[in-house]
Amino acid sequence: IAKEVAKLLEMKAQLGENEGKQKFVLKTPKGTRDFGPKEMAIRERAFKAIISCFKRHGAEVIDTPVFELKETLTGKYGEDSKLIYDLKDQGGELLSLRYDLTVPFARYLAMNKVTNIKRYHIAKVYRRDNPAMTRGRYREFYQCDFDIAGQFDPMIPDAECLKIVHEILSDLQLGDFVIKVNDRRILDGMFAVCGVPDSKFRTICSSVDKLDKMPWEEVRSEMVGEKGLSPEAADRIGDYVQLHGGLDLIERLLQDPKLSQNKLAKEGLGDMKLLFEYLTLFGITGKISFDLSLARGLDYYTGVIFEAVLLQQEKEHVEEPVSVGSVAGGGRYDGLVGMFDPKGRKVPCVGVSIGIERIFSILEQRLEASEEKIRTTETQVLVASAQKKLLEERLKLISELWDAGIKAEMLYKKNPKLLNQLQYCEDTGIPLVAIVGEQELKDGVVKLRIVATREEVNVRRESLVEEIRIRTSQC
Amino acid sequence: IAKEVAKLLEMKAQLGENEGKQKFVLKTPKGTRDFGPKEMAIRERAFKAIISCFKRHGAEVIDTPVFELKETLTGKYGEDSKLIYDLKDQGGELLSLRYDLTVPFARYLAMNKVTNIKRYHIAKVYRRDNPAMTRGRYREFYQCDFDIAGQFDPMIPDAECLKIVHEILSDLQLGDFVIKVNDRRILDGMFAVCGVPDSKFRTICSSVDKLDKMPWEEVRSEMVGEKGLSPEAADRIGDYVQLHGGLDLIERLLQDPKLSQNKLAKEGLGDMKLLFEYLTLFGITGKISFDLSLARGLDYYTGVIFEAVLLQQEKEHVEEPVSVGSVAGGGRYDGLVGMFDPKGRKVPCVGVSIGIERIFSILEQRLEASEEKIRTTETQVLVASAQKKLLEERLKLISELWDAGIKAEMLYKKNPKLLNQLQYCEDTGIPLVAIVGEQELKDGVVKLRIVATREEVNVRRESLVEEIRIRTSQC
């Protein structure tokens, strides 16, 4: 017995030790980050540009829950489904965190029988992907989606989506970019004429999608080795996917002896031609490239697809600009709403998603390099005191200012030093200081100090609000 | 063998049938809702009022991930911990959805060694509670939090939090309200002098917290029956918790023979007196009630606590206004950051959380009753055509307008009828129509129609942007 007890005690000691080792870790979950005030200021700048573009195009806004019924997401994302976050079964419905904003949008349309809407939705989505945080790839990240749902004449909403991407990327001044465009029907037609069996269309499409990260040789060996495609079919695909260009290429492919015989490809190419005509009217074809290697990973696309990539700043000795990654993508998905509708009624949709995290990364890096000082508050005036025992007077004055809509702060000290109060303004960029002192109180005035110039003026108390408004109207 | 096959076939048929029965349910998860364009317009109005108040008080903004490490939330919420949503263990860290914004804020402060910040945070939080959606209680809901962290002179930040609640509720015009105030030190002192054992403080506090939903008799029987408190102690508590008032009550309790002997209670009452002095300077004591029955459910409070409740509109034959529920709450939590800091360094904090969902419910109901028409877009002008075959001209014009920053829409039809285009403006509240027609194109003008007055003027194409800006500057 003694032996057994000793053994148990030893085990207990080990356990205790292990428990001690399981120290509390102070961190955010893998692949996520906090946004501090400075990051938020940058983020809100970017959102402002994006939202104002969406509103310029007449979009309404909606919001949906962060999680959906698990079955709502099932069968929508193809090979990426394994990246969905599930909630623990704690009784009741099985739930998953949303993977994008498109599937919840389609669920929303079907559930509310909406057949016609132009909306934007800015919210976080979740993917259990391998994070690459320095490159702006996270497990929790914002998407900024704009979609047009409804039965319309071909390519008009599609062209508007591309116009929106062009406007936003230009407005944010992220440097040179190109928007690659393709069409799922052209891809499928191409697969057919290259001899890919119908059942392999989606998986071969996934392989093509990797061409922006892998050289053709690797993609080809995945097609042939892992996915069992014939080497001849792969080589035929290889010939097509290196093509990119504009209206000229579309015309050439419309004459292609094989592609022109395929109904799907012909439809896709016809619409692509129409799209380029509209984009010419918008004056943006300079940044658009019809690119047969663009595939997009998600299952639900049915027509036009597109993706915007930033081009590396030109450096000496670099011959061609190199792509540094996708910042927007989207396409047409005419079948997704029908998957949710009990009677399978379809609502054609096309939309674009702005990948804001990469844009944040770039804006952050740029701001750091520029040493621009970014304000994180909008405070117009600090209510300060020159002597001790004036807390009550400061409270009275700041309350008056707040009630008049002035953005005001004070230090939460009974008797702060004037120097500390002025220093606070320097640190935080507050442009004005309203100083109460005994003499000023007697005279019915407040001393207003302009931080930048160190100028001080006495302002009658009843004119203070107006004076602050005038002096900060440029802020 | 035939028999076996028949059996298998039968089983298969049954399986097929069951699969058929497991019909897909088109809904959002229990306790959650979508926000359509109309609801979003209301929501954004409320957010605007709240954010502008937070900014008026000089707050910065931060954001944290929607989930935290499970252990980050452990031991912070007392009896409510069972309501936390856990994520499924899919390998890697164990995660939970945030239950409030306060614990993530404390984690953020400790992790980034921030000892001094005034910030707001508006985001969704998650509770597996019994939803009561018509009363605005959801499982996913927004919190709008404002907190002040740092070592300051007593009650100055606390008073500002109450001022903020007062400003927001007044600004949103939700009707009459009262802000109940108490202090955990007064509660704990009261429990001590009533004879509650130390170990039962928190659980008895939870019972007191139910006084806004249950009569005293039920709370008393929970204390005595479930929680094993002596009936005498319960009755003594009963005497205290019916007290509410202002400075007069504070003075009276400072003289109370039992409470005044308790160090904690004395400290709490002293600070409460100071708080009321500051609130008097802010001119808001009319809506503040020092209320000994206010307990607040969460474990982490250490000092002042408060809760704002809306009072039912006065009706005839109703003697006293009845509370319809809490719309804001908060308090001081000086120990929470120290729970995360590896060396236990404390950062005193006080904050307020606006319960926006109930406010939405009220605003929605009011809007429905008023029949006010709410616009869900900001579109200034519809680009329309009077004849067929003018799609290209519409695309060219709308592109010019977008590039000039005008909010413009067009119908996505090749040849829409003018009547349909005008009807669209009526339906959506677009104030102007820019009509292109063959004659106008020849003359270099655009016909601008003012929807409200049906007035039409010819505007030279180069002046159109300016004309639209002038005519919609009030929008």
Image (cartoon, coloured by chain):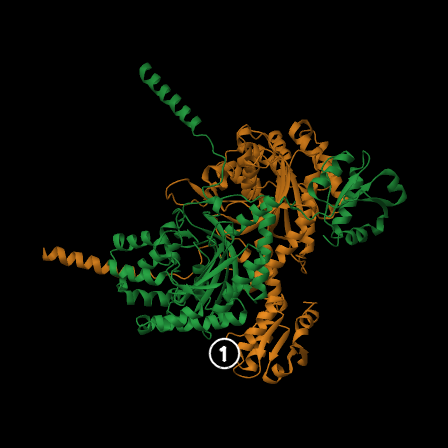
Chain colours: A orange, B green
Corner quadrant of residue A219: top right
Residue B84: give x, y in percent of width and height.
39, 51
Q: Is residue A198 above or below residue A49?
A: above
Seen from the viewer's position, the closer of residues A207 and B29 is B29
- Identify the chain of the residue marked 1, using the numbered disc in the image: A
Question: Where is mark 1, residue-wise?
Answer: A414
Seen in the image, is A448 located left or right of residue B393?
left
Viewport quadrant of the N terminus of chain B: top left
**Number of disc labels:** 1
Which amino acid, by three-letter code, is at mark 1? Lys
Task: Tell me if I can see residue A197 in this picture.
Answer: no
Q: Residue drawn at (64%, 74%), measured in percent from left and top? A: A432
Q: Residue drawn at (39%, 25%), measured in percent from left and top? A: B15
Seen from the viewer's position, the closer of residues B372 and A174 is B372
Q: Which residue lies furthest to the left in this view?
A: A1
- Secondary element type, mark 1: loop
